[in-house]
Each structure stands twice: as C-alpha cells, then as structure tokens.
Image (cartoon, helix red, strand yellow):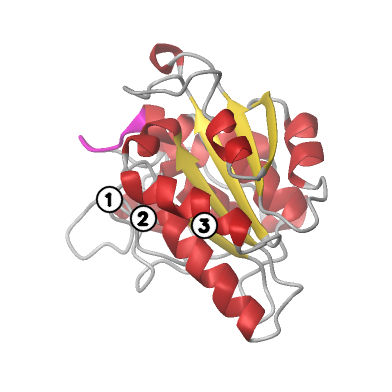
Amino acid sequence: MRDNLPRLRDPESGPAEFEDLAGLMSRMTGDEKHAEAATSTVDALWVLYDRVLRVDPAMREDRDRFYLSKGHGPQAYYAVLCAKGFFQPELFDMFGAFRSPLGYHPDRTLVPGVEISSGSLGHGLPLAVGTALGLRARGLTDSRVWVLLGDGEFDEGSNHEAVAYAARAGLDRLNAVVVDNHSATQGWPGGLETRFAAEGWAIQRVDGRDHDALEKAFTTPHPGRPGLVVADVGAAADR
C-alpha cells in the first residue's frame, strides 16, 4: 500500500463521514476516471447511503435496492460503499488494474454491494422498473428501489418508455434521482422533471449539494405513484 495517500479513518475513531470520501476517491488513479461524472453524484450518493437506504453489507432479501445507472463514473459510488463497510480501502490502490474488482464500470459480480453492472446509458431506469414490479409480485412491499441517472441519459429512448410505464403501473416504491449538471444535448422544455410530471410522477427539484434538502426530498412520501428527485448540481464545466 502507498503510505502517502489518504486513508479511511481508524475504525476506533467512529464511522466514516462525508469528508472522508475525497481521500478515498483520490486513491483511484488512471486515465479513465470520468472524474466529473463521479463528483457530480457524490452528495446524492452519500445522503442515500447515510440517511435513507435500508441496506448494509449483509444484503438481506428485504433490503432496499440501489441501481447506479450512471455507471461510467463509479468512483464516488465505490468510495461510499467502502465508507459504509462493503469492502476495504486497499482495493482502491488497484483501481482499473488487470484483475482488479474495481473497474471503470461497476460489476455486480465483483464489487460487494453493487446491484447491477452498468455504464451503458439508458438501462438503469428500465431495470429498476422491472425490479419494482418483481418485488411487488413477491410481496416485498417494504423494499424500495432507487436508481440514479444522469441528465444526459434522457437522450436514450428506453428511459422515456420506463418513465411512461412506471406511473401507469402505480410503482410507488420506485424512486429516481437524476443528477442534473446541465449536460444533456437534447434537454427538455421547462426542465426534465416536466417529462416525468406529464406521465404522473411525483416530482421535486433541489440543490444537489444540500444534504438536508436532498434528505427531505428523498423521504417525502408519494403514495400511488413513483417519485423523482432532480439533484441540480449546476453547469457541467463546474462539476
């Protein structure tokens, strides 16, 4: 291990904090980091795993499910999973290396806590819709499904089909978080949340760096229909 790199705090000093994530992310080096894609998601990911999701390394069957659709920038995701005890920080020194479990896209068969292999944009929301249907059919009605997407993913038609279907199916255990860094080439008149609203979703837009605002939005009930939170993190060039 390279001793000059930041480390996760000693376990005896207490649980990891948000401030520890920067040190963990700095240990991942290489040419394909997609750093902006990662840093735009770090706040939403932390609030979900620290305050909202019912999930831990035991991966119980009645857990909440989290899908990272924006899988081409997984560094923040890896850091949050590590901070929450899914694996040890030593793995970061192997990031992107041959035979390393931590690849440039997350692999559900290699990384503890990862629910879907992702990176090809446009698949996370349809998969989450199917999972919500499956959990409901099995009677696991306490389990919620969360999926995090980037605004640019809405150039993909598969997402629009999922948006249209989810509300009609009454998937109120389904929650989408869209990180809006204003990078979408197509965009949507009035903001992308209007696309969801037209199909019957409950919608909110909040400051994507404000942890209390994110928590409030994530925990607002939306009975009878799926919920969307747009986490606005500003211009892509800045994030």
Number of dots carrying numbers: 3
Q: Does the magenta stretch include residue 33?
A: yes
Q: Mark 3 points at which residue?
A: 165
In this rendering, position of residue 72 left or right of residue 234: left
Residue 173 is labelled as: none
The residue indicated by pointer 2 is 123
Could you tell me the amino acid type at mark 2? His
> Is disc 1 in contact with disc 2, using a CB cutoff of under 8 Å?
yes
- Amino acid at the residue labelled 1: Ser
- Is residue 165 visible in the rendered image? The answer is yes
Q: Where is residue 231 in the image (x, y as percent from the top left)?
A: 61, 30
User: Measuring 69% from the left and 26% from the top, which residue is drawn there?
Assistant: 206
> Disc 2 on helix, strand or loop?
loop
- SS at circle 1: loop
- The residue that appears at 27% across and 62% down in the rendered structure is 100
Say whether disc 2 or disc 3 marks the residue closer to the N-terminus: 2
Q: Distance between the residues labelled 1 and 2?
A: 7 Å
* Secondary structure that dominates the magenta span: loop
* Image spot of residue 75 (x, y percent): 41, 43
Q: In terms of depth relative to the viewer, which is nearer, 187 or 105?
A: 187
Residue at the spot 41% in from the left edge and 23% down from the top edge: 187
The amino acid type found where label 3 is placed reads Tyr
